[in-house]
Image (spheres, rainbow, N blue to C red):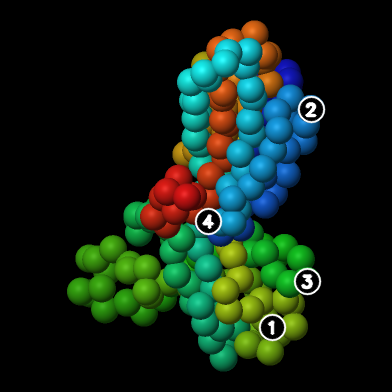
Amino acid sequence: MDKKLTWLKQLSETCGVSGFETPIKNLLQKRLQGKAKVSYDKLGSAVFTNEGQGKDLPKIMLASHMDEIGFMVKHITKEGFLKFTCLGGWWEQVMLSQRVTLHGSKGDLVGVIGSKPPHILTPEERTKVVAKRDMYIDIGAADEDMARNLGVFEGCPVTPYAEFAVMGDGKTLLGKAWDNRIGCAVMADVMENIGTKHPNTVYGVATVQEEVGLRGAQT
C-alpha cells in the first residue's frame, strides 16, 4: 500500500466520535510537526498556522472536522445490554447488526447493535423499521455488574467499526468517517506542501463536534 493510501487508512480507521477527537488530532499533529505552528481553542479544535511573506497578509482558513458519527452509552440494563444515544445523524435502516467499538475505562470492547428478535415481534412490529430507542449494544456481558467490571460507564463513547479497503476499480475507497477525514487529509496535504513563498497567512483548522451542531467551526 502506497504512502497516500496508508495515510487515508489511518485517518479512516482511527476512532474519534464527536467530543472524543484526540486520536485524530494526534495523527495530524504528527503529520504536520515542523510544517506549521499549532495552537488550540478551548473547545479542542487544532489550528495549524503557516505565515507567508506578504506585509498585509490575506488570511485564509481551510477548515475540516475531525469527528465522526457514533454513539454514547446512556444506560446499562440489569441484563448487561447498553442503551445508547446517537452522536450525529443515523438512519435506522443501517444500524442493526452494525459492529461497534466501545471505548471503556479499561480498554476497547467489541459490541454489536441488536434489538428484539423477529420471532417474538408482533405482526405489526414486523412491518416497521426498528426505532433507535428499541435498539441496544451487546458486548457479551451477562449482567450489569459484568458490564461495569469490563469498564463500561454512562457517557462511554462508541465508534462504528469498518475496515479500510480499496474496491474493484482500484481507486474507489471503502471505509468509515470519510465525512470529513478526507477533508483532514486534504488540509494536511496543503499545510505540508505550501511552503512560505506565498503572500498569505493560511490556517489549517481541524475542528471538533461538527456532527452535533458545527460547534468547533463556530468557535
Q: Position of residue 79 (x, y in %)?
A: 57, 87
Please name the amino acid that badge 2 sits on: Gly
Residue sitting at 47 percent across and 39 percent down? 179
Task: Identify the residue under disc 2.
Answer: 34
Three-letter residue code for mark 4? Ser
Q: Nearer the observer, disc 4 or disc 3?
A: 4
Residue for point 59% across, 56% down:
42
Q: Which residue is under mark 3?
A: 106
Name the secondary structure under disc 3: loop
Residue beneath label 4, please?
18
C-alpha span from label 1 to label 4: 23 Å
Q: Residue furthest front?
A: 55
Q: Secondary structure at mark 1?
A: helix
The label nearer to you, 1 versus 4, is 4
Say which label, 4 or 3, has the lower sequence index. 4
Pointer 2 local density, CA inside 10 Å: few below 14, some 14–19, many at least 20: few
In the image as oriented, which residue stretches furthest toward the top? Answer: 197
Q: Residues within 10 Å of mark 1 (few under 14, many from 20)?
A: some
Q: Nearer the viewer, residue 127 or 54?
A: 54
Circle 4: element type: loop
Please tell me whether mark 2 sits on a helix, a strand or a loop. Answer: loop
| Residues tagged 1 and 3 counted as in contact (Cβ below 8 A) | no
Task: Find residue 73 and report its horizontal and vertical position in percent.
Answer: 54, 73
| Above or below, comparing residue 75 to residue 157 in the picture | below
